[in-house]
Image (tube, rainbow, N blue to C red):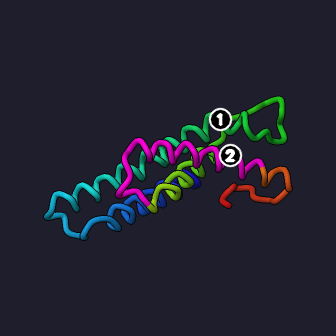
Amino acid sequence: MMVLGTFITVIGWSMLNAAGYGTHSLNSVSARYATELAFLNTFLSGSFCAFFSFIFKRHFVLGDHRKTQRYDVRSLCNGFLSGVAAVSAGSGVMKPWSALVTGCIQSVLYMLFCLIFKKIKIDDPMENF
């Protein structure tokens, strides 16, 4: 259910980012370009943040099972949502490489806040802070 909820949320968020840029008319080249760029940057940032969160979170934030470090779907889904949220303010005006950098930085911030929440013992089982 978490993957389905993430999928629905990201599709809606990417449509919102794409519709928020330009003149809401796709008759001009510049409006189409801003819309396409916002759509592309939303998925690029979310994808890179999800990938890095999924791969590196098990090394960064150790859970209760210190001997069996596992990949988890939570970090994949929440990383994607975190990356999409991080890029949404400037998704229509930034270059694709800066969306990649934004996704990577947001992945580190997401893992850092997961670690902080675990250290200060704030109960957040779905990590949707």
In the displayed structure image, the side of residue 50 where residue 90 appears, left or right: left
Instruction: Find numbered disc 2 in the image and state the secondary structure of the residue it sits on.
Output: helix
In the displayed structure image, the side of residue 121 where residue 80 appears, left or right: left
In the displayed structure image, the side of residue 9 where residue 14 appears, left or right: left
First reached walking from the N terminus: tag 1 or tag 2: 1
Mostly what secondary structure, the magenta segment? helix
Say which mark, if any, is on residue 56.
Answer: 1
Furthest-left residue in this view: 27
Identify whether 31 is placed above or below 115.
Answer: below
Taking the spot 39% from the left edge, 65% from the top edge, the residue there is: 16
Residues in magenta?
90-115
Label 2: which residue?
111
Furthest-bottom residue in this view: 24
Identify whether 31 is placed above or below 99.
Answer: below
Taking the spot 58% from the left edge, 45% from the top edge, the residue there is: 105
Q: List x then y, in percent, for residue 91.
A: 40, 56
In the displayed structure image, the side of residue 68 where residue 92 appears, left or right: left
